[in-house]
């Protein structure tokens, strides 16, 4: 399987932040530093493992990871699906994907692609994930991405989303609000909305939700229902 694919004339939407390209060289150590608040690298690995479990990933499955960044999640999924499985990571940052290629395995493919236009046929994947990607997008784009993920998942397949959650503890909320100013307007809008409702509105049902890290992070999953709309 080719390690990487390039889609001709990839459209970079207006909301796309060039920050991803600028920080690609330091992204992994930066994430490790910022993750101290949620349990460090071990905490992140636990969350990613929970996402993989929520998707129901088993050997031989085809799995999509949207906004895959430097490919950490893809590499973890690849270990689970094994040689008979397939993992595809899509991202708009070419520099992030260059970093991701250092984690390449025979069963991983990376695509430079807009998540609103995933270059795969209807129902190609068994399941899909997106981790800390939706909060970077305006509301309508989030919905477009969730609907597009639904399109490329088989009926009965699962989606799992790992992203911010608005904390209930007053002190944690104060610190969290400061961080949201760093993240920007789309993140502030994201935490004001209900992720479970967004996933349901995109055509998924059997919604399940769990929170961790002082309720600052949530994992929400859903099952694709019905035919492609």
Image (spheres, rainbow, N blue to C red):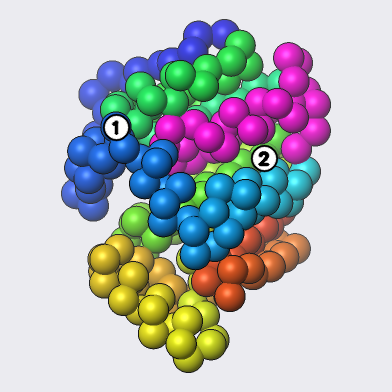
Q: Residue at x 74, y 30 (%)?
A: 80
Q: Residue furthest bottom?
A: 170
Query: Do we see residue 195 in this rendering?
Result: no
In the rendered view, does 173 fall on the left or right side of 199?
Answer: left
Residue 35 image point, x, y percent: 48, 56
How far apart, in angstroms, are the residues tagged by discs 1 and 2?
Answer: 29 Å
Q: Closer to the camera, 206 or 178?
A: 178
Question: Which disc, if any, is residue 25?
Answer: 1
Q: Is residue 52 visible?
A: yes
- Snapshot quadrant of residue 73: top right
The residue that appears at 24% across and 36% down in the rendered structure is: 21
Q: Return the residue nearer the eye: 202 or 25.
A: 25
Quadrant (top left/top right/bottom left/bottom right) for the N terminus: top right
Q: Residues within 10 Å of mark 2 (few under 14, many from 20)?
A: many
| Residue in view at x 54 percent, y 62 percent | 38
Q: Quadrant of residue 74?
A: top right
Q: Is residue 76 located in the magenta-colored stretch of the structure?
A: yes
Rendered position, 87 above or below 24: above
Q: Residue at x 64, y 70 (%)?
A: 211
Look at the numbered discs 1 and 2 and tell me whether their residues touch, using CB distance below 8 Å.
Answer: no
216 vs 153, left or right, is left
Local crowd size for mark 1, using a 10 Å CA cut-off: few (<14), some (14–19), many (≥20): some
Q: Specify the segment rendered in magenta.
A: 57-84
Q: Which mark is residue 127?
A: 2
Q: Position of residue 45 (x, y in %)?
A: 62, 46
| Disc 1 element | helix
1 or 2: mark nearer the eye? 1
Q: At numbered mark 2, what does the secondary structure look like: helix, strand or loop? A: strand
Where is residue 154? Give x, y as percent: 69, 38
């Amino acid at each position: 399987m080719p390690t990487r694919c390039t889609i001709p004339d990839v459209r970079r939407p207006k909301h796309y932040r060039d920050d991803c390209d600028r920080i690609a060289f330091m992204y992994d150590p930066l994430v490790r530093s910022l993750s101290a608040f949620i349990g460090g690298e071990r905490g992140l690995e636990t969350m990613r493992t929970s996402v993989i479990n929520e998707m129901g990933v088993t050997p031989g499955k085809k799995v999509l990871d949207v906004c895959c960044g430097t490919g950490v999640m893809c590499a973890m999924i690849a270990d689970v699906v094994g040689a008979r499985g397939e993992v595809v990571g899509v991202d708009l940052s070419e520099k992030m994907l260059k970093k991701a290629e250092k984690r390449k395995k025979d069963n991983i493919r990376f695509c430079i692609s807009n998540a609103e236009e995933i270059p795969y046929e209807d129902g190609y994947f068994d399941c899909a994930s997106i981790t800390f990607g939706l909060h970077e997008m305006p509301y309508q784009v989030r919905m477009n991405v969730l609907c597009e993920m639904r399109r490329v998942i088989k009926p009965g397949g699962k989606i799992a989303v790992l992203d911010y959650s608005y904390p209930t503890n007053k002190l944690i909320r104060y610190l969290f609000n400061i961080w949201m100013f760093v993240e920007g307007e789309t993140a502030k809008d994201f935490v004001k909305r209900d992720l479970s409702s967004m996933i349901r509105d995109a055509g998924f049902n059997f919604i399940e939700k769990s929170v961790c890290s002082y309720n600052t992070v949530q994992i929400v999953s859903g099952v694709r229902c019905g035919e492609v709309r």
